[in-house]
Image (spheres, helix red, strand yellow):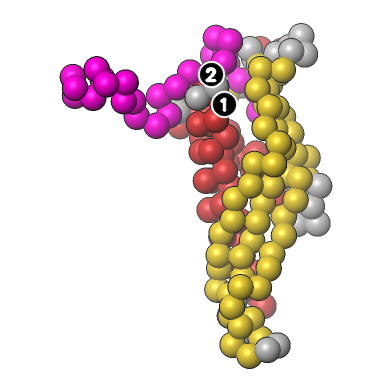
Amino acid sequence: MIFLSACGYRFSGAGKLPAGVEKICITMLKNNTSETGVEITATNALIYEFSRNGVAVVKDADKADAVLSGNVASLRTETIARKTSSIASGRRVYVNLDLKMMTGSGRILWSGRGITDRETYQVTSGDVSSTDAKKKKAVENLLKRLSETVYQRITDDF
């Protein structure tokens, strides 16, 4: 362990928020997609990730050192595999986030546009509800990973 700390190695999530921020308010993201509820899932994933890493997440922006806000800019799916020319067997979903962290006075501490990731899911032929459930789970997994990415970018001061 001494060797690892001496060479500058650190565990993921060990970074600090910019400008001495200790308490953060994460506002409900705006949904610029046609996917109902994706903003709730994305916001909850961000709250979970910051809380999991020991950041105090508060509901009231006036009690926070900074506010993280933004939107789910896009969500799209594409077919990546087919059983036949008209029947899909696999799809990929992409989510794109635009976020910024600001102080109460309006100074931007961090901004990230076009934060994108993707997740693949299987299509159940003839069972729309099963396919929808798989897509929903893929979006949840994807937003969890995106939240980890956002936290790492903010704490690594990128």
Question: What residue is shown at x 57% (from left), y 34% (from top)?
Answer: 150
Tell me which numbered mark, 2 or 1, is placed earlier along the sequence: 2
Kind of residue sitting beneath label 2 = Leu
Residue 45 on image: x %, y %: 57, 41
Give yes or no for residue 11 being in the magenta stretch: yes
Q: Nearer the viewer, residue 38 or 14?
A: 14
Crowding at label 2, few (<14), some or many (≥20) Cα neighbours within 10 Å? many
Q: Residue at x 32, y 21 (%)?
A: 8
Question: Helix or strand or loop: what does disc 2 sit on?
Answer: loop
In the rendered image, residue 3, in percent from the top left (x then y), is placed at 19, 22
Give the extent of the magenta segment.
1-29
Q: Which quadrant would the C terminus be assigned to in this image? A: top right
Which of the 4 image quadrants contains residue 98? top right
Q: Is residue 127 magenta?
A: no
Q: Amino acid at mark 1?
A: Phe
Which numbered disc covers residue 158?
A: 1
Residue at 79% in and 52% down:
33
Around disc 1, counting alpha carbons within 10 Å, would you say few (fewer than 14), some (14 to 19), or many (20 or more)? few
Which residue is drawn at the image coordinates 56% and 52% (left, top)?
142
Most foreground residue, 129 or 2:
2
Alpha-carbon span between mark 2 and mark 1? 11 Å
Q: From what the image shows, is residue 16 above or below residue 46?
A: above
Q: Point out the frontmost of discs 2 and 1.
A: 1
Which quarter of the rendering shows the N terminus?
A: top left
Q: Which residue is mark 2?
A: 17
Q: Is 123 above or below relative to 135?
A: below
Q: Position of residue 108 (x, y in %)?
A: 72, 17
- Which mark is on residue 78? none
- Quarter occupied by residue 92: bottom right
